Structures are given as structure tokens and as C-alpha cells.
Amino acid sequence: MRVDALDRKAIALGLTPGMTLADARARAPHLSVAQADEAADERLMLGLAAFCEQFTPLVAVDPTCGLMLDVTGCAHLFGGEAAMRACVLQAMARLSFTGRVAVAGTPDAARALARFGAEGVTPPGEDENFTRPLSIAVLEAPRETSVALTRAGLMTLGDLADRSSAALTARFGAETMRRLTRILGREDARITPLRPLPECIVERRFAEPFLDLAAIENVLRPLIAEAMGILEKRGEGGRAFEARFFRADGAVAALNFETGAPSRNVEALLRLFRLKADSLTDPLDPGFGFDVIRFCVLRAETLAQSQIGFERQGAQESDVADLVDRLAARFGRERVLRFAAHETHDPVRAASYVYAAASPSSRPSSWEKPEPGEPPLRPLFLFDPPQPIETMAETPDGPPMHFKWRRVRHMIARAEGPERIAPEWWRGPVGRDRRTRDYYRLEDRKGHRFWVFREGLYESETAAPRWFLHGLFA
């Protein structure tokens, strides 16, 4: 077993990460040891990353127990890069964490300075001057490569930077040279943030932690209005939203909600937030108070201007969309469904469930409207699977005269059909489970209407076709 991490007291005793546990105990017999828990470490780093999103929305987790923050365009909100760095250190100290923070022009340069060099802020364009004195250990190259560099007398990044890149690449590999150029700031590599950048971000910071849950809507209302103003200038409306609450103790709470259509309605969005907050099994807890409250538009779409007319159709569609949004916020988007039509002649596949809040571009086509006064061609209720029935017909390929279903015999007064529906050939060859169906619309003497079918063609598909009840008309 080897040592994975150490505290300050252990480091002061001369212990180092990577040494064997036996050697560590030999040097410090009273050493306290705990089993490493990588899953817990990962959860901790993800929690710290969420906490650091109050400084910038672009946060990535570094594999070596670090965080990478892209602060481009954010530093001025804190009074400059030096002041922002001080804020990060103070925030970590409040959580009982110590850290090394460096600011540079590229992620690799900042990471190298924080781990192997001097902390602080690197002036623009000075990344190479600040990283040249660093040891070649910053390259984190394989052991054989590090030994070869040392034997060649190349001890610092500056020694490598002064040599021919082609010769170094041929001898030590392209990956080592790529790391060198990135650390020196000659090549930039953007970080991959944990979450995609929102379309719009507005926030409010408090000099003292905010504790009044009853007044949260009073804080959110101007934030939402500001975000909607930004979207209005772009000609867009929001589809997905998030309210994030950064607590003083490092915890972060987030409430997400969506709308079925692009929206800039401030009061409607506040109502959705209220419904979402009320439906939480774990209520929003301010703890020691919120330092930052942020409102994000995660997804936006074009919102065209519409002319208000005298008809109620537009208003009815808006009312339905508002109802869907409220139900989705209350019960969850995945629990609010609707039927959608599909372009197929197979009645089994003609409809499916889709999210009621799905965007219009992702919605399948609608059903054709029947002619006025004509009876419906398809029943409103379908059995899945179809119910077997016993029938009696005048001719083998004719409609039934009567049929028995659930021990009840129905005498047929009227019959319409057949409507032949063949299986979709592109889904595979016709077989025992995929046969041609002849459908009939039947009405018994009591006025009940049924949709039945005979499965299989005589002789060509089966010698004894079977009958099934597939649906009931209203």
C-alpha cells in the first residue's frame, strides 16, 4: 500500500505522497491512517466545483485534486484578477480548505504555477517568463522520459524552450513537447467545463448572507426581468431556466424548470419557480444564508412577434402551454405526456407518448381532421394487446354475423369493411407474428360499436385466421 495524501503535520515529518505505508510507519510510528475513498473525493471535488461557479460559470475539475476556472470576462466583477484570487482563497478558507491559486493566460500555465511555482497573478503575455524557471517535473512525463531529460542536463522548462523543438520531439515524444508549449503559453487549450455555458446569467451578491426565504421572489423578480430584457434584445425567449443559490457554508442548491414554448413572461416564470419550490421533497434551506442568488437561461429559442387577433385560438394555445408548464413544474417534465401522431398506416404504431413540454420542432405530425358529420375511422380506445373473440360469419372472408367477447354474445346489426392493413415490410418479413389484417367497424343491436380484425389471409398466410377485438368507439 502507498500513501495517497498527507496533511501538514505528516509533511513536516518528511513523509511524501507515493511512499509505501511501511516506510511511512517506520518514520512515524504513531501515524493515523485512513483508507482512500476515490468516490468520496470525487463527490467533494464536484461540490467544490459547484461552489466555485459563483465566480465563473466555466469550472472544470482537474484530475490532481484541483479546479480550473476560466475567469475571462469575470475578473472585473470582483475588482480585478488579484482581488478575485483573494476572494477565492477567502471562500475556501471559510470552508476550512487551504489551496494554492495562480492566475495565468492559459489553463496549463496557471496549473503549473499553482502546483510547482509561485502563486499570484501573471501579467498578460508573461506566461513564458514566469514558467521558464519551473522544474521539468511540471511536465508530468513518464519516469523514463524524466530520467532521460535529467541525464541530458535539461533541468528546467527554460532549458527545453531554448532547444530545437524538432529535435526534442524526435527524442522525447510529441506529447512532452505539447505539454511544454502549453505550459509556456505558446499554445492555448480551453478547459471543458462541467456544465455548458448558459445563454444568459444574472445574479445578485449580498454583503451579508441572505436568510429570508419569504423574500426570495422579491430577489428573483428583478433578476428574471433583467434576463428577459437581454433576451428581448436578441429576439429570443427562454425555454430552460435555473435558479442557483450559493450558501455561505459552501452548499449549492439549484431549481430547474422549463417551458413548452419560448417565453419572456416574468410573472409566469416566477409562478413556475414557486410551483417547483413547493414540490421539492427537500425544501430549500438557507442554512447560514445565501451569498449569491443567480438566475440562468440555460436554453433560448427565437421568439417571433405575434399580432393579437380577435380569435380565441391563439389565447387557447397559450392557456394550454401555460397549463403544461405548471403541471411539469409541479410533477416533473417526464410525468406530463401527450399523444402524438406518426406517419404510418399501422394503427399500433400510429400514436405514442411524448413529453407535453417538447419543443415544436421535435413534435411529430398531427392527425388529419375528419370530415364534418363523418364517423371516426379509428376508435378512441385501443386494447393492447388485442382481445381474442369467437365469431360466426356467412362467408370465410366476410364480416361476422355475431361474436362472443368476455362470455357475452353481440349480435351485429351493421358492418363496414374490410379495411386491409398489411404489416410494414421494412420492419422484416411477414411471419406468424406479423400478418395482414382485415379490419371491420361493427355495430351491435344495442348500438355499441367495435373495431375488430381478422388476422391472416386464407391459404397464403394461414389456414385458420383468428379474430380479435382491437378497439371500442365512443
Image (cartoon, rainbow, N blue to C red):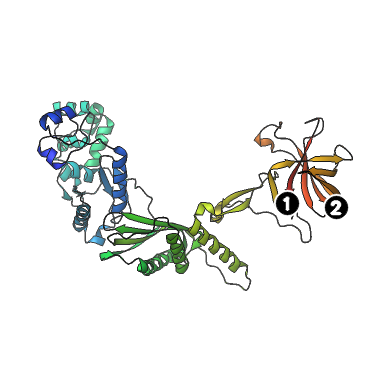
As drawn, 468 above or below 215: above
Task: Look at discs 1 and 2 and give the one toward the viewer.
Answer: 2
Residue 36: percent from left, percent from top: 26, 36
The front one of 398 and 145 is 398
Q: CA distance from mark 1 to mark 2?
A: 19 Å
**Residue 86 picture quarter:** bottom left
The number of callouts visible is 2
Residue 20 visible in the current orientation? no
Determine the secondary structure under disc 2: loop
- Extreme residue toward the right, this view: 394
Residue 248: percent from left, percent from top: 26, 58
Q: Quick one: label 1 or label 2, which is nearer the N terminus?
A: 1
The front one of 120 and 148 is 120
Is residue 258 toward the left or the right of residue 174 in the image? right
Is residue 454 toward the left or the right of residue 365 in the image? right
Location of mark 2 (residue) = 445
As drawn, 328 above or below 410: below
Residue 413: percent from left, percent from top: 87, 51
Question: Which quarter of the image is occupied by the N terminus?
Answer: top left
Is residue 14 toward the left or the right of residue 104 in the image? left
Residue 266: percent from left, percent from top: 44, 68
Give, as a three-letter code, the residue at label 1: Pro
Question: Which quarter of the image is occupied by the C terminus?
Answer: bottom right
What residue do we see at 62% from left, 67% from top?
313
Give, as a three-letter code, the residue at label 2: Arg
Location of mark 1 (residue) = 379
As drawn, 91 above or below 8: below
Instruction: Identify the mark at residue 210; answer none if there is no mark.
Output: none
Determine the secondary structure under disc 1: loop
